[in-house]
Every structure is written in C-alpha cells, then in structure tokens.
Amino acid sequence: MKVGFRKPSIKKSFKARTTGKLKRKVKKTINPFYGKKGMGLIRNPKRSVKNRVYKRTTFGLSDIFRKLFKAKKKRKR
C-alpha cells in the first residue's frame, strides 16, 4: 500500500473536471442509490476498504494547498 505523496495526473484531473452535472444527473435518475454515502461498501467491500486506507495514508497537491490556505485564514483572526 502506498504511503506519502500522490503523483498528480493532469489527464485524470482534466477528465474529472469536464465530466459534467448532466452525466451525474442522468445516472441519479436511473439509479436512486448513485452518489449515496456507503454504497461502495455494500457493492464491493474489499475495494471500498482499500480506497479508504489509501485516502488516509496518502496526500496530494490539493491537500497541501488546502492546509496552507486554511492556516493563513486562522492566523488573521
């Protein structure tokens, strides 16, 4: 299992940002459980547990920026 920094993928981040609301809306009308919390655990428990561990043991650029800017906001108060 990977621990530490996740290497950013420009192709994947572009794909995630361009897959729009319409596609999610269509999926939601077809499948009422689409996007609900905990559905991954019901459908594929092994993958769900692996993804949860991966998410908690690694960090990416967005996590670093989020922490930096969050820390600056707290200092101003």
Image (tube, rainbow, N blue to C red):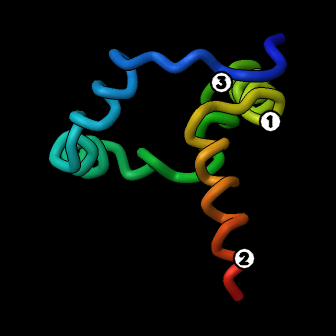
Residue drawn where x is 27% and y is 45% of the image: 24
Mark 1 = which residue? Answer: 56
In the displayed structure, 24 sits above or below 49; it is below
User: For numbered disc 3, what is the local secondary structure?
Assistant: loop
Label disc, if present, on residue 14 of the rendered structure: none
Q: Label 2, label 3: how many angstroms apart (C-alpha)? A: 39 Å
Q: Earlier in the sequence, mark 2 or mark 1?
A: 1
Q: Is residue 3 left or right of residue 68?
A: right
Residue drawn where x is 16% and y is 47% of the image: 22
- Amino acid type, label 3: Asn
Q: Earlier in the sequence, mark 3 or mark 1?
A: 3
Residue 41: image location, x then y, percent: 69, 35
Residue drawn where x is 22% and y is 34% of the image: 18
Q: Label 3, label 1: how many angstroms apart (C-alpha)? A: 19 Å
Among the 4 quarters of the image, the one containing residue 1: top right
Mark 3 = which residue? Answer: 44
Circle 3 packing at 10 Å, graded few (<14), some (14-19), many (20+), is few
Q: Is residue 48 left or right of residue 36?
A: right
In the displayed structure, 58 sits above or below 27; it is above
Disc nearest the viewer among 2 and 3: 2
User: For numbered disc 2, what is the local secondary structure?
Assistant: helix
Q: Label 2, label 1: how many angstroms apart (C-alpha)? A: 24 Å
* Residue occupying the far left of the picture: 22
* Residue occupying the far top of the picture: 1
Residue closest to the eye, 53 or 28: 53
Disc nearest the viewer among 3 and 1: 1
Label disc, if present, on residue 74 of the rendered structure: 2
